[in-house]
Amino acid sequence: MPAPPTGGEMEKANTAHIKQKWLDVPYANLSDAQKLDIYLPNEGKGPFPVILSIHGGGFMFGDKADGQLTPMLEGLNRGYAVVGVNYRLSGEAQFPKQINDIKAAIRWIRANAERYQLNPDKIAVWGGSAGGNLSALAGTSAHVKDLEDLTLGNPEQSSQVKAVVDWFGPVDFLKMDDQFRVSGKGTPNHNNADSFESKLIGKQITEAPELVKAANPETYITPDDPPFFIQHGTEDKLVPTEQSVNFAKRLENVLGKEKVVLELLQGAGHGDPQFSKDENVKKVLDFLDAQLKG
């Protein structure tokens, strides 16, 4: 889960060509972080199916409008609305505030769908790294009240989604170090008190196994979960590839193989340019078309 480049934040995605957009729209009012950006296709009429883009950055960095949004914006050319969402980072609040925010944003989208030409019944989540974890968590925990904070607004709306795209997201924090020790591909430092995961949880993860379990999307898998498209690089040195391999197996065991796609990108590292290549983004959008346009 990369930090921004030294000396500043990640470069912003280019959205100058998008004619219809609303920026920094509050979806809740507890924190300045609780804002989203809405982008609509330049052509066609709504209501448009929605791609909710969830940025990564170790739960500590990143922004809804940074370069991580660029692949998702390709959805505009396929007739999707794209919504970039910010959420409270670990420097401000600890788990489960992040998933509380994502769920609040989904409920807000449903409540305001007509105003912004969005289809409230066709919402997908797509994120990388920390955003992959939050996308997966949104996908498996639709009916989990402990992860909803209905005081953030629109309590009458559902936070359920129709599809999940998880790019190299961490899943079971407590297994990451052992997986790296076995593979030799990354530094086993996730159990440290100053790791991204420990800062998210609010204490050293080895001292808080119940909180770690609550942050694990595997904890909530049920047969009515939406289809998943999971990709991970085989040379990821920040999040072990085994995180996605094991997660996909668990999903398959409950959802069935037809609802789970796992692809390992050979030779790809964490956040590798391979993920954003045209042919790979096309694969993701083909998957979303099958789920949201059928």
Image (cartoon, rainbow, N blue to C red):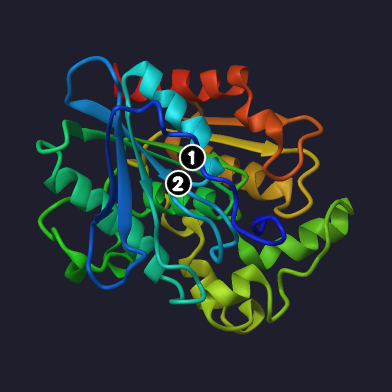
Q: Quadrant of the C terminus?
A: top left
In the displayed structure, would residue 292 be above or below residue 242? above
**Mark 2 to mark 1 CA distance (whole Å):** 6 Å
- On the image, the x and y values in percent for residue 176 come to 71, 61
Which numbered marker is on residue 69?
Answer: 1
Residue under the point 38% across and 70% down: 97
- In-front residue for pair 154/241: 154
> As displayed, is residue 139 above or below residue 147?
above
Going by the numbered disc 1, the residue's amino acid type is: Leu
The answer to whether any part of residue 143 appears in the image is no
Residue drawn at the location 46% of the way across and 22% of the way down: 285
- Please report the residue visible at 54 percent of the width from the left and 71 percent of the height from the top: 212
Crowd tier of the residue under label 1, counting other residues whose Cα lies within 10 Å: few below 14, some 14–19, many 20 or above: many
Name which quarter of the figure residue 230 lies in.
Answer: top right
Q: Is residue 46 above or below residue 29?
A: above
Left or right? Give the position of 185 relative to 50: right
Residue positioned 44% across, 50% down in the render: 64
